[in-house]
Image (spheres, rainbow, N blue to C red):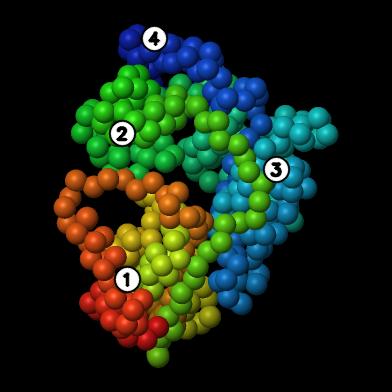
Amino acid sequence: MSGRGEQGGQGGQGEQREQSELAGQLGESGESGRSGRLSVLYVHFGDGVAGGAAGDEEEDRPEFSVLLGLLADFTPVVQALPPDAALADVRGALRYFESDAPGLARLIRLRALARYGTDCTVGVAVNPLLARMAAHSGPAGSVRVVRPGESAGFLARKPVGALHGVGPATARTLCSYGLDTVGRVAGTAPATLQRILGAKAGRLLHERARGIDPTPVVPGEPARSEKSEFRFGRDEIDPAERRRALLTLADELGFRMRTGGQAARALTLIVRYADRAVTTRTRTLAGPSAHTPALTAAAYALHDGLGLQRARVRAVALRAEELMPAELAARQLSLDPREEKARRAEAAADRARLRFGAGAAHPAGLFHAA
């Protein structure tokens, strides 16, 4: 499925002309800073992937590392994106397999299903940004292609919040200026975006809205993660008690990451039930963070989304995924003074805990032992 097939109804002549101009700009600049040839795959393995620390109950599911090995059969340039996705640069594999990138994507999907019973969704494009967005642009279990020259039409009608790297706060800010679609952002002068978001963020957003992403696929091991688990004294059916446990875990993970100079890009919730079944869900954070309220909000959203009601839960765990150095994590500025006060209070509490112990300062409502 190509990006062109997603445009839907036709807009006015002015919008069509704008998209044609954008397509011309993309062609002149080189959509990816590469050769403009389809060569990047974003592979999402779906829900049937076992996390590396999720427990014995997941032994019947393929490990993430096993599925990465499947991609390594095609190319050594594989970048792991835990817990269930990866980028692959297949430029060097096209001649060997006598295939194009969409053909390799279909073969990868077939092998994953035949060998491991895991269906996957694959986005194919000239750069990681477009490949990722192609994979996320429709239902699971297919190969979706954005071909060179189709980026403007593919991106134009998408909400600005769908653009990878644009968090909820930035999306709200842009929408308040009427920049609610990627096409409108692409048609806005870079100087205007820089006044709204700042010089670096505005320039980067303008490039992404035009489908430009020079980021290479960097092979390597999955980013390190941090995990914390809480086991209840009895099978817990009270949602309030489960949320209290999640607050305890989020506070523990946040403190460990902050004092270790790290931030997480995503958070995984693992729920273990009385019958030994396990549910695992992951949520990408609005931006890399080690802020306890941000981790707690993500944990609550994951928990509430499961609709457990009166399920008998034996244990819950949180795993901070895709850790990165905190100094490299860009933080969106907040106009809410309460946000800055909360961060200053958190930093003061961290200093007290480092000096006097874990019980010196912590959010109200925590379990005292986890």
Answer with mark 4 or mark 3, whichever residue precedes in sequence.
Answer: 4
In this rendered view, identify the residue nearer to me: 331 or 184. 331
Does 105 appear above or below 270?
above
Q: Quick one: label 1, few (<14), some, or many (20+) residues within 10 Å?
A: many
Q: Residue at x 66, y 70 (%)?
A: 60
| Amino acid type at image mark 1 | Asp
Depth check, mark 4 against mark 3: the one in front is 3
Query: Which quadrant of the structure image shows residue 238?
Result: bottom left
Identify residue type, mark 4.
Answer: Arg
Among all residues in the image, which is located at the extreme left? 337
Kind of residue at disc 3: Val
* Mark before the other along the chain sequence, 1 or 3: 3
Q: Secondary structure at mark 3?
A: loop
Residue 250 horizontal/vertical position (percent)? 37, 69
Residue 261: name its quadrant: bottom left
CA distance for labels 4 and 2: 29 Å
Residue under pointer 4: 17
